[in-house]
Amino acid sequence: MPETIWRRGAAASAAAALLLLLAACGGTTRGDTEEESTSAVADEADPDAEIPADLAFSYVPKQINNPYMTYANSGGETAVEELDGAFEEVGPSEATADSQVSYINTVSQQGADVLVIAANDPEAVCPAITEAQGQGTIVVAYDSDTNCRDLFINQSSTEMIAETQIELMAEQIDGEGEVAILSATPNATNQNAWIEEMEKLAESEEYSGLEIVDTVYGNDDDQDSFEEMQGLMQSHPDLDGVISPTTVGIAAAARYLSESEYQGEVALTGLGLPNQMREYINDGTVEEFALWDPADMAYLAGYAGGALSAGQITGEEGQTFEAGDLGEYEVEADGEVVLGPPTVFNEDNIDDYDF
């Protein structure tokens, strides 16, 4: 395994490394790190730097065996192969922050060069992540952000994702009616950001006919989500539509609706996997839903981690890097890299996708 830039610097200056490690133990956040960095990121970017071979990449998804995360990380594995690195996927069987911490600690102790993580909580994982950074690990968040990473790969902009879902719902219920949201976990950063933006849109003049009457959480568990969907129909008998911005939730909600008297009567949209939603598109339970390509997201995260590790970029706004087949990307404000706008799936195009 090659030494990262930080590690080479640490070898040259043990005292500096000790200071960094002590700072890491203080549990700094991203805001703190601007003045008191514990990161392995280079101080200055060198756009011509080569990404070293044999970097060790560890992907920690929200949850192992979650179809969405499994498919996503297939893209990460492809990127790592293209970079001649070593890929591993480790993580918890439950989508909780506490359960991710032990995996982060293990990855750090094993000397991973790049940790790519979909955080189950923006704060709870930070002490472990900050310690990993102090040990020389580059940290790239994807899918769900943390407050302590070096870079975040955003699936799309929060605004684009929220407006796509609100627009799809408005079209399916003719712009008027009661709408509920079936989310994942209460502390999922991405879910909460999208929900907040959708609530703002529902208060705008354009979508003033939509009334968001409830938000419930299925914890990204199929059975919990199924029961929450069932509970929504019992609590809100006049419900016109449900938005589920989680692949587990929308699939479980579609299964409930397809087996109930509400099929075709209650609209359902959100973020789903084409392979999971195809039968519900074909039987008329769902008209349209959306998603980015999660494999591209994880692929981009791999190249971003490589660029950071090489020192091509430092995460400053305006810096650019090449991401293999996806082309050139630019770092935006707050260390974010946006993959692109979501794709809308319906009966006309769903068979064009296989994930």
Image (tube, rainbow, N blue to C red):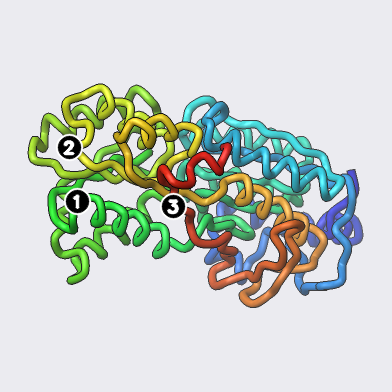
Identity, as a three-letter code, of the amino acid under mark 1 = Ile
Work out whether 185 lies above or below 194: above
Find the residue positioned furthest to the left.
238
Q: Amino acid at mark 2?
A: Glu
Helix, strand or loop at mark 2:
loop
Q: Which residue bears the numbered disc 1?
A: 173
Judged left or right of residue 244, residue 329 is right
Image check: 52 left or right of 280?
A: right
Residue drawn at x 52%, y 30% as measured from the top left: 66
Q: Earlier in the sequence, mark 3 or mark 2?
A: 2
* x, y percent for residue 252: 35, 29
Which residue corresponds to mark 3?
344
- Residues packed near mark 2 inside 10 Å, few (<14), some (14 to 19) or many (20 plus): some
Residue 290's spot in the image, x, y percent?
42, 49
Confirm or deny contact between disc 1 and disc 2 (CB under 8 A): no
Give the residue number, with chain letter if any, for mark 2. Answer: 265
Which image quarter holds the C terminus? top right
Residue 215 showing in the rendered view: no
Mark 1, Cα crowd under 10 Å, few <14 / some 14-19 / many 20+, is some
In which image quadrant can residue 232 be found? top left
Asked if residue 27 lies left or right of residue 177, the reply is right
Determine whether the residue tagged by mark 3 lies in a helix, strand or loop. strand
Q: Which secondary structure lies at badge 1?
A: loop
